[in-house]
Amino acid sequence: MKKVKFEGIFPAMTVSFRADGALDIEGIKKNVEFLMKEGCAGIVCNGSTGEAVNLTREERIAVIRATREAMNGKGKIIAGTGAPTTNVASELTKDAMAAGADAALVITPFNAIPNKEGLYLHYKAIAEVGIPIIIYNLPAHTGVEVDYDTIERLIKLDNIVGIKESSGNFSYFSELVRLFGDRLTIFSGCDDLSFQCFCLGVKAVILALGNIAPRMLVEQLALVQAGKYAEAREVYFKLLPIGRAIGASVNFPAPVKEAVRLLGRPSSAPRMPILPVEKAESESIAEALKYAGLL
């Protein structure tokens, strides 16, 4: 079976909450509408940036449905469905497919740390749900790195269509592109490495930065594809301070949500145990936004 291919900017969308703690469905829809108008190819919901670990099963479904409605038939929805155990991840993947997602983004197991065979069988079982599956490599948060041999085995399965690489290890990423770039969609998930990844020929990213500067990312990719590397690098350098400001592995995604708030779009405090950013960090984020010409 021919693998589904993805191309373009896919923001790893934040999720906003009302004052009473419930989902802000209207705010979510407004953010989706804005991101799609800015030229994004689709939306990733219920991922790390979307606080998936802090959402109930019903809330995850509600976010996908709200996203689908706001997209109005345009673009693709990728829904995060990862969980520590295979059974739960499979159930969440079934939910996502029923709610209208086009693909599932499945982070490696966390807390329960499998060996290579367990990792392979985990993804094999989830792929049997029937929706295209994107492997999500984020070892800093999970303690599991997807090795090349396991990927080689997994890509023989029809529904394994891509991998999101968020380790920050550019050598590992480059080898992924060399080995699998013609057989899978390789998504960069590092907000501070977009230009380098585009120059390797990568055509798709899933970035928290997409919430903040979607049009500039769209422009950067188009410039690289047109061979205008110097101009693309200028865009990248404008965005780099933001990428660095939101890239901390602790208290994530509070900095992303603060940037969205500063830009006047629907946002909220994250759910505990993640805390809102402090004043000094907010000021630093604001300076990065000004440097990029966004504020």
Image (cartoon, rainbow, N blue to C red):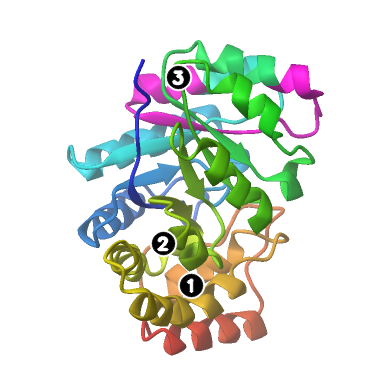
Q: Nearer the viewer, residue 273 or 180?
A: 180
Residues at marks 3 and 2, CA–CA distance in whole angstroms: 28 Å
At horizontal 63% and vertical 83% (from top left) the residue drawn is 279
Position in image of residue 145 (x %, y %):
73, 39
Q: Is residue 129 magenta?
A: no
- Which SS class for mark 1? helix
Residues at marks 3 and 1, CA–CA distance in whole angstroms: 35 Å
Mark 2: give few (<14), some (14-19) or many (20+) Cα within 10 Å: many
Position in image of residue 18 (x %, y %):
45, 54
Type of residue at label 1?
A: Ala
Position in image of residue 204 (x %, y %):
40, 49
| N-terminal-most mark, 3 or 1 | 3
Vertical arrangement, residue 134 with respect to residue 172, above or below: above
At horizontal 80% and vertical 24% (from top left) the residue drawn is 114
- Which SS class for mark 2? helix
Vertical arrangement, residue 259 with respect to residue 54, above or below: below
What residue does disc 3 label?
Answer: 159
Q: Is residue 99 magenta?
A: yes
| N-terminal-most mark, 2 or 1 | 2
Tell me whether the residue at label 2 lies in contact with that at label 1, contact meaning CB atoms closer than 8 angstroms.
yes
Give the position of the N terminus as an image quadrant.
top left
Left or right: 47 with respect to 139? left
What residue does disc 1 label?
Answer: 259
What residue does disc 2 label?
Answer: 211
Mark 3: give few (<14), some (14-19) or many (20+) Cα within 10 Å: many
Tell me whether the residue at label 3 lies in contact with that at label 1, contact meaning CB atoms closer than 8 angstroms.
no
At horizontal 36% and vertical 86% (from top left) the residue drawn is 293
State which region is magenta: 93-119
Type of residue at label 3?
A: Asn
